[in-house]
Image (tube, rainbow, N blue to C red):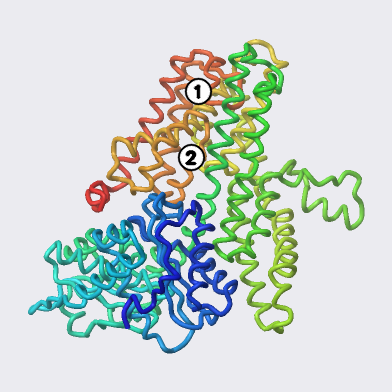
């Protein structure tokens, strides 16, 4: 069987006009339907969408290979589409996808078609092959290009090393259709280019091919495991192993082969031993899963933070330009209609930050059923317990009031509460799924629409109102009392240092929020205080804002002047971090702190502490509660305030340069490999 045996002219469109991922899938599924290979189009389409939710099937280089293996497919088939103008398809390189192949695989034991699909995946790694397909003038020419390339590929004879293989690899993806073979081809081509003898085992849906032998494993320097699913690993006990995602096998092949040939892998221990469990939890097991879920929430949250934060900052700028800078009332930032509009919209966006964080952490853990409990838990964390009215409650209601509200005030748990809510909600839903696993098929439809949201929302509500919000409220109260004591003792410089550090420790958690709420409280007190006391209150607010502006800018400086300490994705956020720091959006540092808290948090806290200390030492004051550079017109001693900010940011930059080690793969990333 050849690739063209699976392609029908009816399933090919060389001039498709789609612009979104949804439109692309709809078009491809309709092409597949035209070939007569699908017996239930809607079920097949949902299977394709579900596969995309597990991770994009876009390969980069303008190619995407969506696929699904389901009983809704009557016979193996391919559909193809060229989108000359390109389509946004969540590609790893950020470039639009132009060439699409949709795979339909029947859910049968007969997998003869998988070798054909593997061959297609391998061919798509060739630049000339992709270009020729995208430029094909007719369906006949399109099919001929594929047929010729397949014939040439089968004529190739793989070279074997007489001395064995320096590097071995295993590639595997969940469906075992496309990524598995593309990663294998990329690694083999990298081996040829680097003159490194390499053998790659593919664990696809059709079973393991090109299986590594015990003798080959014994002689190899290192084994690359580019897998997103489980493969047999006991055979690698005691060998150096590099474990990465299958996508890295495709896009970072030369880097991986170089590292493996240099013996940079770590000694592998099969799961089961205490040492293996400890390493798994630290690197690729529990810790990796927690990080993956966390970054799912953070990546969805950041657009709300950036857009809402900058709009809020613009509100203060508008009022300042209109001559209301330093207005003593709490309406500064919403005095003029335009400022009020910016502040309202920005505030709404910022208000969604914690719910979105929690919702998408839960979504990452439990898929769509986790969204509702996660969002609700995040809303409770963001709004606190004071939204409940317990005034005059007696009896059982009074009992509930005491535990949910107590004496902790408006117990907003903020960012950290949202983190807790997201993880707890996700695992609550997973638990519910296990409990409901043995329900009769007739009840299958009510589980995601009734049982999971109802029980999940109730459970996360109880936990947030009665445990997490009160606990974090107690922490906030204690921190506020501590700051008041320091302020009352007249140690303003020490207070500035502490407040600056607090703004940079947990990036929106109780420590950060305790400092910020303390500062806004001081602004309120300044309105009725004498001149000397009011000046002290304004100094406190200045120290708080400059401390919050340091982390994103310090990190942006580090990615600018010490780029080899950061991943490509982190370097790509440089400009947005400059903007967020200038706008007093401390949350821009969250992805960095989440991925490397041991090094990043001390560096940001130290830089922010220095900035707060200098701001207070220089007697800088601030009469606005937010705004960053947009409200510098309200700053007393603005020149030294800028100096404080820049010095603190440079301290963070230098500490990051010292604490974070250079990444050996930086040179390859810089070269675009």
Asked if 453 appears above or below 351 in the picture, the reply is below
Residue 397 at least partly seen: yes
In the image, residue 415 sits, relative to residue 73, either above or below, namely: above
The quarter of the picture where the N terminus appears is: bottom left
Disc number placed over residue 588 in the picture, else none: 2
Question: Which numbered circle lies on residue 108?
Answer: none
Q: Look at the numbered disc 2 and give the secondary structure of its residue.
A: helix
Task: Kindly identify which residue carries mark 1.
Answer: 629
Which class describes the residues within 10 Å of circle 1: few (<14), some (14-19), or many (20+)?
many
Q: Quadrant of residue 60?
A: bottom left
The mark total stands at: 2
Residue at the far left: name it. 162
Relative height, residue 237 to residue 487 (above, below)? below
Mark positioned earlier in the residue sequence (2 or 1): 2
Residue 105 image offset from top left, x and y in percent: 45, 78
Q: At 27% across and 73% down in the image, what residue appears?
A: 147
User: In terms of depth relative to the viewer, which is nearer, 249 or 240?
Assistant: 249
The image shows residue 659 at horizontal and vertical percentages of 32, 44
* Residue at 33%, 46% in the rendered image: 566
Q: Is residue 50 left or right of residue 412?
A: left
Secondary structure beneath label 1: helix
Q: CA distance from mark 2 to mark 1?
A: 16 Å
Residue depicted at 60% across the width and 15% down the height: 535
Residue 537 in the image: x percent, y percent? 62, 20
* Coordinates of residue 670 in the picture (x, y in percent): 25, 46
């Amino acid at each position: 069987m050849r690739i063209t045996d699976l392609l029908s002219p009816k399933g090919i469109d060389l001039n498709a006009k789609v612009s979104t991922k949804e439109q692309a899938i709809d078009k491809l599924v309709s092409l597949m339907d035209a070939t007569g290979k699908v017996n239930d189009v809607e079920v097949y389409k949902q299977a394709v969408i579900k596969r995309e939710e597990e991770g994009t099937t876009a390969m980069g280089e303008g190619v995407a290979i969506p696929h699904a293996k389901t009983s809704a497919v009557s016979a193996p088939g391919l559909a193809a589409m060229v989108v000359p103008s390109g389509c946004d398809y969540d590609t790893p390189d950020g470039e639009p996808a132009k060439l699409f192949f949709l795979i339909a695989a029947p859910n049968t034991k007969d997998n003869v078609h998988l070798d054909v699909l593997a061959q297609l995946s391998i061919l798509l790694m060739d630049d000339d092959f992709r270009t020729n397909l995208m430029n094909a003038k007719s369906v006949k020419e399109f099919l001929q290009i594929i047929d010729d390339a397949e014939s040439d590929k089968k004529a190739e004879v793989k070279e074997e090393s007489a001395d064995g293989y320096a590097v071995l690899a295993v590639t595997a993806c969940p469906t075992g259709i496309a990524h598995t073979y593309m990663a294998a081809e990329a690694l083999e081509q990298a081996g040829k280019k680097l003159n490194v003898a390499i053998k790659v085992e593919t664990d696809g849906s059709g079973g393991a091919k090109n299986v590594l032998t015990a003798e080959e494993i014994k002689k190899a320097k290192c084994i690359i495991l580019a897998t997103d699913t489980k493969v047999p690993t006991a055979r690698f006990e005691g060998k150096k192993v590099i474990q990465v995602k299958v996508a890295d096998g495709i896009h970072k092949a030369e880097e991986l082969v170089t590292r493996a040939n240099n013996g940079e892998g770590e000694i592998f221990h099969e799961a089961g031993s205490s040492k293996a469990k400890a390493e798994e939890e630290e690197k690729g097991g529990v810790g990796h899963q927690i990080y993956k879920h966390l970054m799912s929430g953070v990546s969805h949250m950041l657009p709300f933070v950036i857009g809402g934060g900058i709009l809020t900052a613009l509100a203060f700028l508008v009022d300042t330009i209109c001559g209301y800078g330093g207005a003593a009332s709490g309406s500064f930032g919403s005095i003029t209609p335009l400022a009020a509009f910016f502040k309202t919209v920005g505030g709404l966006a910022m208000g969604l930050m914690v719910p979105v964080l929690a919702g998408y952490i839960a979504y990452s853990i439990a898929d769509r059923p986790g969204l509702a409990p996660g969002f609700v838990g995040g809303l409770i964390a963001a709004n606190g317990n004071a939204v409940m009215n317990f005034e005059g409650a007696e009896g059982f209601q009074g009992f509930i009031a005491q535990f949910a509200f107590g004496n902790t005030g408006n117990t907003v748990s903020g960012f950290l509460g949202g983190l807790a809510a997201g993880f707890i909600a996700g695992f609550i839903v997973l638990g519910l799924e296990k409990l409901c696993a043995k329900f009769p098929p007739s009840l299958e439809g009510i589980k995601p629409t009734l049982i999971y949201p109802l029980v999940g929302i109730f459970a996360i509500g109880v936990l947030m109102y009665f445990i997490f919000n009160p606990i974090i409220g107690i922490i906030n109260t204690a921190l506020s009392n501590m700051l008041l004591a320091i302020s009352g003792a007249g140690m303003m410089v020490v207070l500035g240092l502490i407040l600056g550090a607090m703004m940079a420790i947990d990036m929106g958690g109780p420590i950060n929020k305790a400092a910020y709420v303390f500062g806004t409280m001081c602004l309120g007190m300044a309105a009725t205080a004498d001149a000397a006391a009011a000046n002290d209150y304004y100094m406190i607010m200045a120290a708080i804002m400059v401390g919050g502006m340091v982390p994103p800018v310090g990190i942006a400086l580090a990615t600018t002047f010490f780029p080899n300490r950061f991943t490509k994705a982190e370097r790509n956020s440089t400009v947005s971090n400059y903007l967020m720091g200038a706008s007093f959006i401390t949350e821009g540092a969250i992805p960095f702190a989440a991925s490397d808290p041991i090094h990043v948090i001390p560096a940001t806290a130290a830089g922010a502490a220095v900035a707060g200390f200098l701001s207070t030492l220089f007697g800088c004051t601030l009469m606005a509660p937010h705004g960053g550079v947009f409200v510098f017109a309200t700053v007393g001693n603005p020149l030294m305030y800028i100096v404080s900010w820049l010095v603190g940011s440079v301290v963070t930059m230098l500490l990051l340069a010292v604490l974070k080690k250079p990444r050996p793969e930086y040179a390859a990333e810089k070269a675009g490999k």
